[in-house]
Image (cartoon, rainbow, N blue to C red):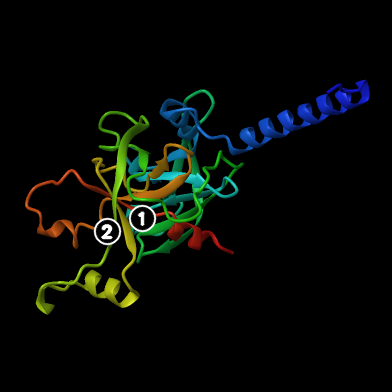
Amino acid sequence: MSITPMAGLFLRVAFGFFAVFSVGVSEAQEYPKDLPDLIRKAKPSVVLVGTFGDLDSPRFTFRGTGFVVGDGRRIITNAHVLPEFESAKSRFLVVQHKNYAGDWRPRRVERVVSDKTNDLAVLDIEGPPLQALSLKSGEVAEGTSVAFMGFPIGGALGFSHVTHRATISALTPVALPAPTGSTLSARNIAQLRTGAFKIMQLDGTAYPGNSGGPVFEISTGEVVGVINMVLLKSTKESALSHPSGISYAIPVDAVQRMLMP
């Protein structure tokens, strides 16, 4: 079968358009090539959460990890990470991010919205937008390979991003029935009244300082959960006399509900 010059030109143009379109779709998704690529892309979006006081020593006190979402001026972290005091001129809540030179730079938090049931908080910060992370839509499957990033052990070893690999071992209810009514705590009762929700159980070990950090699906780079080191201690791990090596994360759909207008 012969192809006329005009038909050949049409095929070349059509093929070229298809190739450009395919590249455009691929670039728009921006999936990580591998875990090192995911870590490199995510680091600018994972921040320190703490307090800054002119009279404190040190002036910055680290409290937990957070990550940038939305328009680049919103930070997700755990509600228990936040201090109990009200911001004032001498001491206030801040997040710190790394600039292009690799130096930590503070941003003052202007507004806080918290969800104590899910132990989550949204912090609105001042200044220009930072690089935001993408949130996954829909439930993630058990067995999915993930990575979580944060600042374990706080500043004891210096503030460097640390990443751990893990697998989502189970999606399990956060509120378990107590064996007797006398063993129910105020938190257990509040959770039972609100209704049980699923929590991610990970086979990786998170440490103090990881709280509030993002959990990534490695294949896409999207955030699927938020590390939590407090919410489960009075329920699932209360029966364990020794550290289990199990970590937990709040599924990202709870974050998405908080971000709805």
Compared to residue 158, the image places residue 205 above or below, namely below
Q: Are marks 2 and 1 in contact (CB under 8 Å)?
A: yes
Could you say which is closer to the camera, residue 42 or residue 106?
Answer: 42
Quick check: 80 left or right of 256? Answer: left
Quarter of the picture holding the N terminus: top right
Q: Is residue 48 visible?
A: no
Residue at image position (26%, 51%) is 229
Q: In this view of the protein, can residue 3 be seen by the observer? A: yes
Question: Which of pointers 2 and 1 indicates the residue nearer the eye?
Answer: 1
Q: Looking at the picture, how far across and down is residue 52, in whole percent?
A: 40, 44
Which quadrant of the figure contains the C terminus?
bottom right
Q: Amino acid at mark 2?
A: Leu
Q: Residue at x 81, y 31 (%)?
A: 14
Question: Which residue is labeled 1 in the image?
Answer: 250
Counting residues from the N terminus, which is met first, the one under dot 2 or under dot 1?
Answer: 2
* Residues packed near mark 2 inside 10 Å, few (<14), some (14 to 19) or many (20 plus): many
Which mark identifies residue 231? 2
